[in-house]
């Protein structure tokens, strides 16, 4: 029941802020009672409007099935795709396998972390 209450509290908070930027200034670990104070930005997903948060939660719960999303929300495939694209545009994505930049390879070579042959191979492997 705690997660339902937390979810309702979160929805009330996001409706209260109406999408305006919010900074959390105190965090308390419930199990230990330890509190940390400072200025903490909310994660990007938490900054989305509550409707988009519900949409993403439903998408994840449905294992990314657009067909299921069509049924749940009663809208068409293009509508689901357009909403996903809009939400994706509001988020910053981390490159999971970034290609090394030329300057990074040369910096590593300059520090002696890689050999000249290794640097050449890395630079040639770049797209």
Image (spheres, grey):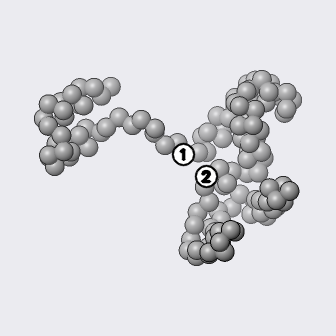
Within-10-Å neighbours for mark 2: few <14, some 14–19, many 20+:
few
| Above or below, 14 relative to 113 | below
Q: Give the structural element (helix, strand or loop) at label 1.
A: loop
Q: Position of residue 31 (x, y in %)?
A: 68, 68
| Above or below, 113 relative to 78 | below
- The answer to whether residue 83 is visible is no
Where's the C terminus, which quadrant? Answer: top left
Q: Position of residue 29 (x, y in %)?
A: 65, 69
The residue at which mark 1 appears reads as: 92
Q: Nearer the viewer, residue 4 or 84?
A: 4
- Residue appearing at x 84%, y 33% in the figure: 73
- Residue appearing at x 76%, y 51% in the figure: 50
| Above or below, 59 relative to 18 | above
Q: Quadrant of residue 1?
A: bottom right
The residue at which mark 2 appears reads as: 44
Drawn side of residue 54 relative to residue 127, left or right: right
| Above or below, 71 relative to 41 | above
- Residue appearing at x 66%, y 55% in the figure: 47
Q: Are marks 1 and 2 in contact (CB under 8 Å)?
A: yes
Q: Give the structural element (helix, strand or loop) at label 2.
A: helix
Q: CA distance from mark 1 to mark 2?
A: 8 Å
Q: Nearer the viewer, residue 103 or 32?
A: 32
């Amino acid at each position: 029941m705690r997660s339902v209450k937390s979810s309702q509290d979160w929805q009330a908070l996001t409706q209260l802020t109406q999408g305006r930027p919010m900074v959390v200034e105190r965090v308390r670990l419930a199990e230990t009672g330890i509190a940390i104070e400072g200025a903490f930005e909310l994660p990007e997903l938490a900054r989305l409007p509550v409707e988009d948060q519900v949409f993403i939660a439903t998408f994840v719960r449905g294992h990314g099935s657009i067909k299921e999303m069509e049924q749940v929300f009663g809208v068409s495939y293009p509508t689901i795709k357009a909403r996903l694209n809009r939400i994706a545009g509001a988020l910053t994505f981390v490159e999971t396998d970034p290609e090394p930049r030329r300057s990074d390879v040369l910096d590593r070579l300059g520090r002696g972390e890689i050999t000249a042959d290794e640097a050449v191979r890395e630079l040639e492997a770049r797209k």
